[in-house]
Image: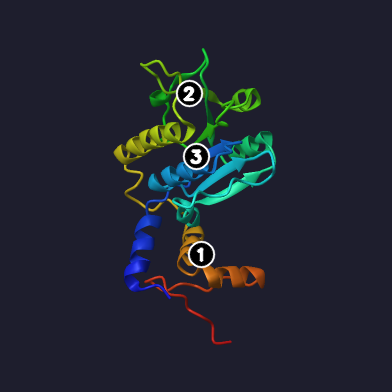
Amino acid sequence: MPTLERLRRLREVLDRRQPDLTVLMENVSKPHNFSAILRSADAVGVLEAHAVHPTGGVPTHHKSSAGVAKWVYLRVHPDVETAIAHLKDRGFSVYATRLSDAAIDYRKVDYTRPAAVVLGSEKWGVSARAAALADAEIVIPMLGMAQSLNVSVAAAVILFEAQRQRLAAGLYDRVRLDPATYRRVLFEWAYPEEARRLRSEGRPYPPLDGEGRPVWSSS
């Protein structure tokens, strides 16, 4: 059972979650990169991340970052077409990180609107198919000999630009989640074992009191 201090901390974090900012990892195969991207996503308040992996699964989390997986939901898609269609159906503009003549400076994007950033595999980058389906291609300008950053570093650079814009717009100053989602996520964060048990039994979560404690029915 979490302490009241722990519940306050969870609510403080949840109050700043951004349901309309996310990343889509397309075949990011190295566990340390995968986990580092999730860590950056958590740091800027991403609620749910997305991934496409050729095996249908995702890389094992690097042990130094494994804990962050508890705080960022991960939705795995069978292919990039399905993933991008899902994001667009939810109102996201999709931006593919890609070195191309069509790419625009990543800082020119308005990240205060629903935005999904596509990050490609370490070896090949974002696929041509993903780029074609995206609303725009973005690039981080490089002034040295290297043409690009490591994928997890690039994710952090772009996500913290999104955070900067959203802070300036006041999007972290109010709760962005609808009440039902807020209560669900808080229960899953605070009482993970109970949440798993109730899901396996097909039972609803209990209501929460003002401090985040579950109110169990006596029936």
Gap between marks 3 and 2 measured at Cα: 20 Å
Gap between marks 2 and 1 measured at Cα: 35 Å
Residue 174 point in image, percent of width and height? 35, 51
Instruction: Find numbered disc 3 in the image and state the secondary structure of the residue it sits on.
Output: helix
Going from N to C along the chain, the mark reached first, 3 or 2, is 3
Left or right, residue 142 beside residue 73: left
> Residue type at mark 3?
Asn
Q: Residues within 10 Å of mark 2 (few under 14, many from 20)?
A: many
Q: Is residue 94 above or below residue 71?
A: above
Identify which residue, 192 or 184, lies in the foreground: 192
Q: Which residue is mark 2?
A: 138
Q: Which residue is mark 1?
A: 188
Q: Which residue is mark 3?
A: 33
**Residue located 46% across and 56% down the image:** 67
Residue 175 point in image, percent of width and height? 39, 53
> Residue type at mark 2?
Ile
Gap between marks 1 and 3 measured at Cα: 26 Å
Going from N to C along the chain, the mark reached first, 2 or 1, is 2
